[in-house]
Image (cartoon, grey):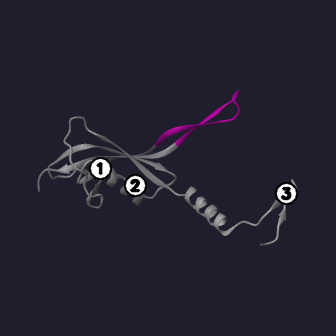
Amino acid sequence: MGPRRVNPVSGADRSPRSPARTILLAVSLLLAGCSFVTTRIQPYLGGPTFPPSDPTKVEILRAQPTRPHERLGEVFAEPSGDPTVAQYEQALREGAARMGADAVVVVYDRMQVVGTMVTGPWWAPAASPIVGRVVVGLAIRYTGP
């Protein structure tokens, strides 16, 4: 057993940190800095329903395709942290795939106010906006060649 350390304030003994505790602390700090994107889907009421498709085959489009297709619903990408473009695209693919889509057309990609942070004492609060990126995609399924 290693040397014991004494806390100068309380006088209590402290044993050195174990390697497992140090690793756990390092992993939790790494995870706290991660960015990710969650999705919320909104299938159109009365629209066609399909079994889920393969997310790796879902195309990301920036304009309406010329191929015949039907609209299935909307996919909302909601960021946490500062995700990359690849993370946004993967989230859109996964959301559209849950509706059985072949592609997702990005129809909205803007920075906007997504919340408000209130700080200060209760008698003089200060409100400041929280600005975040909002991406909305239209899930489509091709009906022809």
- Image coordinates of residue 100 in percent, x first then y, are 24, 50
Q: Estimate the spatial distance between the alpha carbons at disc 2 and disc 1, rounded to whole Å.
A: 16 Å
Residue 120 falls within the magenta-colored stretch: yes
The image's mark for residue 12 is 3
Residue highlighted by disc 1: 98
Q: Quadrant of the rendered structure where residue 90 is?
A: bottom left
Residue that sits furthest to the top in the current view: 123
The first of marks 3 and 1 along the sequence is 3
Q: Quadrant of the rendered structure where residue 120 is?
A: top right
Is mark 2 in CB contact (under 8 Å) with mark 1?
no
- Mark 2 vs mark 1, foreground winner is 1
Residue highlighted by disc 2: 88
- How many marks on residues? 3
Nearer-the-camera pick, 14 or 121:
14
The residue type indicated by label 1 comes to Arg
Seen at 78% across and 72% down, the residue is 2
- Image-based side of 60 in relation to 21, left or right: left
Residue 51 falls within the magenta-colored stretch: no
Q: Is residue 80 above or below residue 118?
A: below
